Amino acid sequence: MAGFHVRSLLVTGANRGIGLGLVQHFLRMPDPPQWIFAGCRDPKGERAQELQNLASKHPNIIVIPLEVADPASIKAAAAKVGEHLGDSGLNLLINNAGILKVNTLDTEILEDMSEIYTTNTIGPLLMGQAFLPLLKKAAQGSPGSGLSCSKAAIVNMSSIGGSIASFFGWDMMQVTSYRCSKAALNMLSKCQSLAYKEHGILCVNQAGGGGWGRG
């Protein structure tokens, strides 16, 4: 995209799937970010090995422990990112981490639905709150009055499964709790866009395959 450049970004669930793909994509850009913060639950675990290998070759990748279902982990991650960035702030927050459990409507249970909502919907809410000061700094330090990902933005990775108008994939997987959590995430994105616009922060959804692993 012509003119698109971010100095710093954070991706949750960055050790595999779409999250890892996003890290790789930004590395391949003609003018890659100065800082790529890659959040995952267990940076030293086997599932993060590919991400760690990538980070060992690219000093602009900072792997940080981050469990989006844990407010204390989010707070610690925001503090660590803030230490690296100082007054420059964070340009782009990509809430990619998410989980899915293959249940039918009849077999959904309270525990599963609560866990999926906490990760897929409440996690992005808490991430937006925790990183808002850094996003504000980036917006204030960027020229121009418009909204853009180059300036300051939150991108929430949603899914066509969260669409009320579409029943895509229902015959393959009902996954009601996942669909409900992504529909709620869509509304959260709208609320964030209304609340954070005055701070110069763009808030949007990006429909993907996923967020089927929180990292």
Image (tube, grey):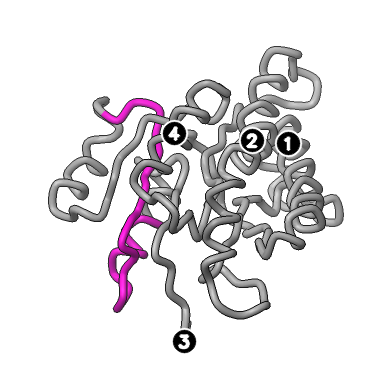
Depth-wise, is mark 4 or mark 3 nearer the camera?
A: 4
Q: Give the residue at x 51% y 71%.
A: 150
Query: Can you say whether 184 is above or below 23 in the image?
Result: above
For residue 30: magenta? yes
Quadrant hosting residue 114 = top right
**In contact (CB < 8 Å): disc 1 and disc 2:** yes
Identify the residue under disc 4: 77
The residues tagged by marks 4 and 1 sit, at their Cα atoms, a distance apart of: 24 Å
Query: Can you say whether 31 is above or below 63 in the image?
Result: below
**For residue 120, which numbered disc appears in the image?**
2
Mark closer to the chain start, 2 or 3: 3
Mark closer to the chain start, 1 or 2: 2
Depth-wise, is mark 2 or mark 3 nearer the camera?
A: 3
Depth-wise, is mark 1 or mark 3 nearer the camera?
A: 3
Identify the residue under disc 3: 2
Query: How far from the left and from the top, in percent, is residue 68?
Result: 54, 30
